[in-house]
Amino acid sequence: MIFQQYYLECLSHASYLVGDETSGRAVVVDPQRDVSQYIDDAAASGLVIERVIETHVHADFLSGHLELAERTGATISYGEAVSGIEFPFEPLAHLEQLDLGDVRLEIRATPGHTPESISIIVYEHAGDDVPHAVLTGDTLFIGDVGRPDLLSSLGVTADELARALYHSLHEQLLTLPDETRVFPAHGAGSACGKQLSTERQSTLGEQRLVNYALQPMSEDDFVAVVTEGQPTAPGYFAFDAIRNREARPTLDEEHAPPALDLDAVLTAQRDGAVVLDTRDPMDFAAGHLRGAVNVSLTGRFAEWAGDVLTPETRIVLFSNPGTELEAKVRLGRIGFDAVLGNLAEPLAVLAAHPEATERASRLTARELEERRRTLGGDLQLLDVRSPGEIALGAIPGALPTPLPRLIDAMEQLDPTRPTVAYCGGGARSAVAASVLAGHGFTDVSDVLGGFEAWRAETADAA
């Protein structure tokens, strides 16, 4: 058997290639949208990808099922409870078996994160008593389980899905042997759960011991514990959940967006496009095009861009030369395809056109404390971390404003008051400050090192 996990750090997303080296037949499970790596690795191993299996309709990224089907002719499959799919697919029934040769896959219906969720049991040999692995999608994570509250806007309640999840875990997954290795679709950092581990695999036996959601408890207690304290979901989740059902255009992952001169960029900006500066926040602070939004490629670029932009936003990239294609592909992974182009020779443009540039303010933790003392209640201090982070400690007087809710929260803020944003380490607050400045906030800063730097500063002062 050939079994390979692919892990995409910036989206905390895991996908899988499973093949039988004797027969040369293979499947890909939960692929990311740029699919060349699966095709190249399959070819190198003498495999033909004949099926793409989605464990559910994903909300946190745009899946690569259409791209793989277009490039390989593979059949697309979902669990049989799926609905609303606009393209040809082959449903998979509960307990259905797929033989790739000697390698066997067994489908288990495991609703809970979504109604159509499935898990895939992988046997290296058809006659094995103990599975090699179970691919659990977003049903069971390492250290957590899938959140059941993402579909409330579609008429399915969190309570209903949480109860289905309880039964899926106890009747379909925890009945497997303890030695069975667990391979989920996401890891730490994903908004699909609240307590995901940094580990990328485990065993069912280990998860019985350490996973809070698998401890002995009643169904009602399980519903209460898994629905409480979930992170704020990015606004693009609903869009992706719909888009993954649609017969949409496929991603071009080979060609960079066209180069644009400054006049074309400024014209697009006046017409409503957003200049998305993908450089490091310190470089952005030193000088950037007026009104640009800063989301650095060094962080969770696509997710954070999806927090503060909409899928319909027309985007012009301001990127370090050679990174334009990366930025376009990473935006494409969440379905943000309206990239008009990138500014040609961006650093030279900044140097030649100071009238079109501005700087950004970044405060040290000590400078923040000075502002808090001098400005008092006149200072708008925004905490753009998730609710779970805020619950563990916050700067007194800060307004809880998770980054995915920043745009909505601006209606309640005063753009004429001094405003400071902070997060855990300084990356998300740089995004937030650039968005606020672009929306007319006249005195806005973010905090270098974020809450951790402030806590260290105030601890030293004490």
Image (spheres, helix red, strand yellow):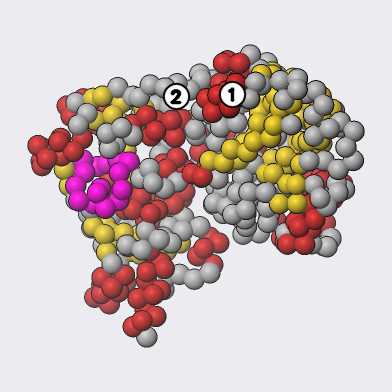
> Residue 340's x, y, as percent?
33, 25
Give 130 or 77, whichever is nearer the viewer: 130
> In the figure, 377 relative to 28: above or below?
below
**Mark 2 Cα within 10 Å, few/some/many (few <14, many 20+)?**
some
Q: Residue at x 9, y 37 (%)?
A: 352
Magenta-highlighted residues: 277-293
Say left or right for 82 vs 298: right
Say the numbered circle drawn on residue 44: 1
Residue drawn where x is 66% and y is 59% of the image: 228
Q: CA distance from mark 2 to mark 1?
A: 20 Å
- 224 up-or-down from 79: above or below: below
The front one of 253 and 413 is 253
Please say whether residue 291 is one of the residues in the magenta stretch.
yes
Dot 1 falls on a residue whose secondary structure is helix
Side (left or right) of 345 relative to 400: left
The answer to whether residue 86 is seen in the rendering is no
Which residue is label 2 attached to? 253
| Residue 69 lies in the magenta-colored region | no
**Residue positioned 85% across, 28% down in the render:** 96
Q: How many marks?
A: 2
Q: Amino acid at mark 1?
A: Ala
